[in-house]
Structure formats: structure tokens, C-alpha cells
Image (cartoon, rainbow, N blue to C red):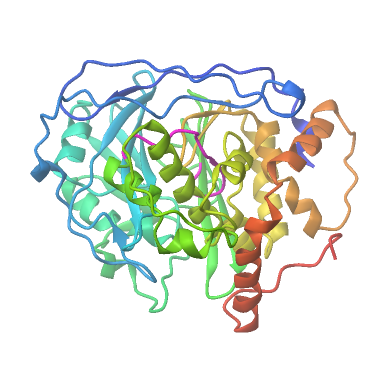
Amino acid sequence: MAATSVASAPRPLRATPRQAVGAPCHHHHHHHAPPFHGLRGRPRLVVSASAAEETSSGSVSSSSRFYFNITGFPFPLGPFLNRRTIRTEAVKGSVWLFEQEQALGFSSVSTNTRMTVIKLRSGGLWVHAPIAPTKECIQLIKELGAPVEHIVLPTFAYEHKVFLGPFSRKFPKAQVWVAPRQWSWPVNLPLEFFGVFRSKPLEDEDGGTPWASEIEQKVLSSPEVGIGPYVEVAFYHKPSRTLLVTDAVIFVPRQPPECIGKESLLAAAKNGLAVKILSKGREVPDDPVVDNKRTREKGWERMVLQILFLGPSNLLEPNASFAQMSQKLIVSPIVKTLVFSKVPEKVRDWVDRIAADWPFRRIIPAHFAAPINASRSDFLAAFAFLDEFLPERPPASPSLSFIFASFMGKAASYFPPDDMKTLSSLDDFLVSVGAVKKTVSGRKR
């Protein structure tokens, strides 16, 4: 098992400061996150604060944020008209993060979606998981002063694929690369339908890409998990020792991402219909929403629990469940339940190869917090739940880091059982109608 190849348990890690830009202005604020202490006070993962302040003093016109989108299934992806872009520098002079709000249909549920831009030794830019190409977003890319050479779609997932065509048209000289085995549902539409006409496939451990000496890649291409395969390409940027993933792992921050608007947070904090249904039978007060820090945090906590569990047990008082799910590197409950538990061998092989070959010290996923200061042990711990679905495999030599990963894995994959009920019921229903595979039976069964 790859866990044994990690030399030792991770030492305490510092937060990496990020500087944020709302648009053309360049006056930066630095933010340092407090260290996160996990089980028994042991220093754990630290994530740089996502609450970076906008510095453009309202100088950005709303027209530069205009982007019209009403597509998506089963829910259209909002915001439908305006998307603010926040740019932050994750690694000085070489890695930048671009974030926009992503809303779920007409609900008051939003998260952030992230595009990562890396400057190659060629002087050109390598773009991972493109976002909506608003005027503001394109301006923030152009300010980096380098041509876009490659645009990479690392997944089959609609919320990332939908922007690939429009984004690539803004940079017609760039080569487009896509994850293999693209599909869509309920209608399996070709990439041309999404406005992508000249792409090359991303292949597993391909040493022939123009960026191979700087960025390596490993493809997770699962068997059918139901209506289609799960496909995700992980990348490793060697100069900065950074692992890039799309949806494989997440780190939920305590504070809402800067790109999520105040209006969205306050709407989620209001005691609406969803709260009345998911309140554990308690009476729901019809209090007016007062705009303050705690109200916005409550809105964020409710959003997160709905994104992670679909139907959490208690939206009225979300803080206890939120505390269980935040400030740790985890696999999202939805991805764990509906995807990875169905194809554990494929996922285990991909995770082990990543941990064995890439000595990363930070992870950048496409959602929630980033960059996350995390080691291979932390990454393996997030996937420790796979062992429940696989036959017993004694490690060659149970090293300290293997024991640590196993111990931390129990914490990383503990999800409140009450919150998991809706997701488990949905899984049972989808299995019964043949939409997803039955969960693989291993030691657990």
C-alpha cells in the first residue's frame, strides 16, 4: 500500500498567505489562517484564509461581470446573469487561483468554483478547469502578462465542461485538452455541442505533453458507476510541489469564500421552506434576517450541509454538523456514497499512485478552500474509508505514517449518521432504479 511509502507523519504546517484582487487594482492584503488542531490537539492541516478582501473599491462595473447561463441538469447553474471573479496568488509568480460563485438552480445554495492558472517555463499559461469568461475574468488573466497556451478540462462534470467552449474562444491560439470518456446525461451530447471543436485527450502518465517536464498527470477512469463513468485527472506541479484535483477531495473553510455574494448568504440564513422541513421537528421562528458576521456564517453553514448531504438532519441549527465537516481534508459525502464506494479498487489504485509518486505539500481542489497545506499522509487518510469496501490487505511494513494515516482516516471519514440518512436513501433508490451500481461489498458487509 502506498501509505507505507510516505516517510513519516506530517509535521505541523503553516498557512500560505494569498493575495486577492477583485479587479484592476493591485493593493494587496495578506491573511494568515490559524493552525487547525485535530484529534488530541495534534497540529493538522492548515488552509490559507479564503476571506480575501476585494480591493477595487467598487470600481468594477457590473457589465464586466455579466455572463448569461441558464443551462444545467437537473438544476440550472447560477448565478444566471452576474459572476464576480476573485484572483489570488497561491505561489508567488507561478500559480494563481480564479474563483466565481456557483449557485444551484433557483435555491439559496452556492459554493465557489475554481480555475487554477500555472505559468510554465515557456512563459505561457496553463489553465486548469476554466470558469465563466466574463470581461473581468479575462482582464485578470491578461494582467498576468503571459499568453494562454493550454486550456485543460480535467473532468467529465458538467459544471466545469459548460465553460470550456466559451473560454477557449477567448484564447483561439491555445490548445484545448480534455479528460477522456466525456459523457453527459440525460442526452449524451458530443463535445462539439459544448463549443469544443479541436481538443486533444489527456492520457494517463503521458510523458509526451508539452508540459510533461513540469506537470505530471494521472487519470482516474472508473468502470460505469451507473449512467456513466467517473473520470478525473489529477496533476502534480513539480516546481511548487502542488497537487491539483477537481472533486476528489475538499476542505470546507469556516468562513464563506469571498466570491459568494452577501445576498446569497443572507438568503440561506433566512428560515425558509427547506429549514422548516429539515428542523428535526422543532418550531421554526420567523425572525427577520439581520446582516452581520454570524448571520452570514449561518448562511454558509446551511449551504455547505445541503451541498454535502442534500438533506441534512438539522438546518435550523447547522453549527454542530458543520463543525464535524469543516477544517479537515475529506472526500465529499456525495462523491463517497454515490461514486467512490462503487468502484473502490480503481479509486484505491489512483490514490496509491498519487501518494507513491508525488511528494506534494499542498492541494488545490476546484471547490471550497485552497490552497490546502497537506501531505501524502493527509490525502491517504481522506480515502481510508475505501478499506471498508476492499478485501483485507496487510501493509508490507506498517510504518509510523501508515498507522497515523489509518488513525486520521477514521476522523476524516466520520460523517454524522443523521445527516447521512437522506443520501443513503437516495443511494438505495438510485440502485433500485438502476441509475447507480450497488455499493461493492468488502469487509464492511
Q: How many marks?
A: 0
Please state the horizontal and vertical placement of residue 231, each as a whole percent of the image.
Answer: 52, 59
Magenta region: 245-259
Please state the horizontal and vertical placement of residue 22, each as a whole percent of the image.
Answer: 22, 30
Residue located at (70% from left, 22% from top):
10
- Specify the principal SS of the magenta part: loop
| Rendered position, 101 above or below 360 | below
- In which quadrant is the N terminus drawn? top right
Residue 145 placement, left or right of 377? left
**Is residue 258 one of those drawn in magenta?**
yes
| Rendered position, 445 above or below 94 | below
Please state the horizontal and vertical placement of residue 102, each as a whole percent of the image.
Answer: 34, 51
Residue 293 placement, left or right of 9? left
**Is residue 89 one of those drawn in magenta?**
no
| Residue nearer the viewer, 243 or 432 | 432
Residue located at (38% from left, 62% from top):
158
Q: Quadrant of residue 435?
A: bottom right
Q: Quadrant of residue 116?
A: top left
Please state the horizontal and vertical placement of residue 237, each as a whole percent of the image.
Answer: 48, 31
Residue 306 visible? The answer is yes
| Rendered position, 184 above or below 46 | below
Residue located at (71% from left, 68% from top):
439
| Residue nearer the viewer, 57 or 71 | 57
| Residue nearer the viewer, 380 or 72 | 72
Q: Quadrant of residue 161?
A: bottom left
Residue 121 visible? The answer is no
- In which quadrant is the C terminus drawn? bottom right
